[in-house]
Image (tube, rainbow, N blue to C red):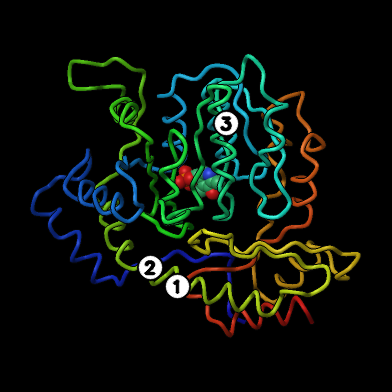
């Protein structure tokens, strides 16, 4: 039986990549913002519809660096319904995560629940466009303005998403995109930051390279988070195919929706109004009382058929032992409920529609 994983990385034809990396043998420029890095940066600025993108070794370090460059101190309001990275980036910057619940339709931070969490220590809001679902960016901006807070978006899932024709990376002070192998667009490992204005760009670039502005001027405590030329070359190739891949993902999502929409006890996301989506993930919620099978039952049933869905995102990050005392999933009951019922079904560009049908047959059978 064919094995189907929750995702399968997009790769260009091998010859295309070989052709792209040939010039690296000629110029021997392997890393440190070389020609491939510069081309990818330009191409991404155009594709993402933003003025400025900076590239990093991965999305997580990009997020850590963004928080560092903002010089934040105190508490950051964030969501527990995310990948470990979001919460870890806050904690590794010496900041305290304060968890806000999510709303039940698209699982993004519930703006109505932000204000009660704000106090004199609050410095920023770090929401996540989870699964490619866009946060209520206008409501969040309004709150941030009112209390003079910074907004950093974890946009790891929203590569290429547009809201009202505007690139999602244009919202907030900074947005972080992940180019990890499993994401809609990949550079194998990689990440990017987009900025509302250029104020932070130089600082992020310096922190990316050991805190150095140049060889003699080292004003910051930095790290090494540079993207190599080979990773950038992979990005240049993959970007040529990303539109096509998103179109194929959309077809798979539409097939899932045809099969699963309206089934009692199964909840799935619909397109968001005014949003041009990227069909990054296909989460489905299973209510055992109505559907007859629990999330865990469905995961087990699929696994017996060599199909591996994932319990994204379970457990919530506010249950992580590394946070210490004072946190509980009970503080965010909507997120806790979703985490117990959600299963992210296989979705990638090359997933065949007959496989989507087979997955749905097994779930519904
Ligand atoms: C993938 C991911 C990250 C981290 O990105 P990497 O490029 O893997 O470091 C951060 N946040 C979310 C929500 C992610 O899914």
Q: Mark 2: few, some, or many residues within 10 Å (few <14, many ≥20)?
A: some
Foreground residue among 55 and 200: 200
Q: Position of residue 257 (x, y in %)?
A: 65, 74
The reply, left or right, for residue 97 in relation to residue 47 is: right
Foreground residue among 27 and 145: 145
Q: Label 3, label 2: how many angstroms apart (C-alpha)?
A: 31 Å
The reply, left or right, for residue 51 in relation to residue 88 is: left
Q: Label 1, label 2: how many angstroms apart (C-alpha)?
A: 6 Å
Q: Is label 1 in contact with label 2 (beta carbons under 8 Å)?
A: yes
User: Residue 226's image quarter?
Assistant: top left
At 66% from the left edge and 79% from the top edge, which residue is drawn? 258
In the picture, the disc for residue 243 is 2
Residue under label 1 = 247
Residue under label 3 = 125
At 21% from the left edge and 40% from the top edge, which residue is drawn? 33
The image shows a total of numbered marks equal to 3
Q: Position of residue 32 (x, y in %)?
A: 22, 38
At 83% from the left edge and 64% from the top edge, which residue is drawn? 294
Q: Label 3, label 1: how many angstroms apart (C-alpha)?
A: 32 Å
């Amino acid at each position: 039986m064919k094995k189907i994983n929750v995702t399968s990385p997009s790769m260009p034809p091998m010859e295309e990549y070989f052709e792209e990396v040939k010039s690296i043998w000629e110029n021997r420029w392997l890393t440190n913002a070389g020609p491939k890095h510069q081309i990818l940066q330009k191409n991404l600025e155009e594709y993402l519809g933003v003025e400025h993108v900076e590239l990093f070794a991965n999305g997580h370090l990009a997020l850590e660096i963004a928080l560092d460059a903002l010089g934040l101190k105190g508490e950051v309001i964030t969501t527990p319904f995310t990948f470990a990275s979001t919460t870890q980036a806050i904690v590794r910057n010496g900041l305290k995560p304060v968890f806000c619940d999510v709303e039940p339709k698209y699982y993004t931070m519930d703006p109505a629940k932000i204000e009660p969490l704000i106090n004199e220590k609050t410095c920023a809001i770090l929401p996540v466009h989870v699964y490619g679902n866009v946060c209520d960016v206008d409501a969040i901006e309004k709150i941030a303005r009112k209390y003079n807070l910074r907004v950093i978006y974890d946009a790891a899932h929203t590569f290429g998403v547009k809201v009202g024709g505007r690139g999602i990376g244009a919202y907030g002070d900074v947005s972080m995109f992940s180019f990890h192998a499993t994401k809609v667009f990949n550079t194998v490992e990689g990440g990017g930051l987009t900025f509302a204005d250029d104020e932070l760009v130089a600082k992020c670039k310096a922190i990316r390279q050991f805190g150095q502005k140049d060889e003699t001027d080292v004003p910051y405590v930095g790290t090494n988070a540079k993207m190599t030329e080979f990773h950038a070359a992979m990005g240049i190739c993959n970007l040529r195919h990303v539109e096509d891949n998103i179109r194929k993902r959309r077809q798979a999502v539409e097939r899932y929706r045809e099969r699963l929409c309206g089934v009692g006890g199964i909840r799935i996301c619909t397109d968001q109004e005014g949003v041009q989506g990227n069909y990054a993930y296909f989460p489905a919620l299973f209510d055992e009382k109505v559907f007859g099978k629990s999330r865990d039952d469905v995961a087990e049933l699929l696994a017996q058929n060599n199909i591996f869905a994932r319990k994204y995102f379970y457990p919530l990050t506010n249950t992580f032992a590394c946070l210490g005392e004072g946190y509980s999933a009970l503080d965010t009951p909507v997120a806790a409920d979703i985490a117990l019922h959600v299963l992210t079904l296989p979705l990638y560009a090359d997933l065949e529609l007959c496989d989507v049908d087979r997955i749905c047959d097994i779930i519904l059978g």
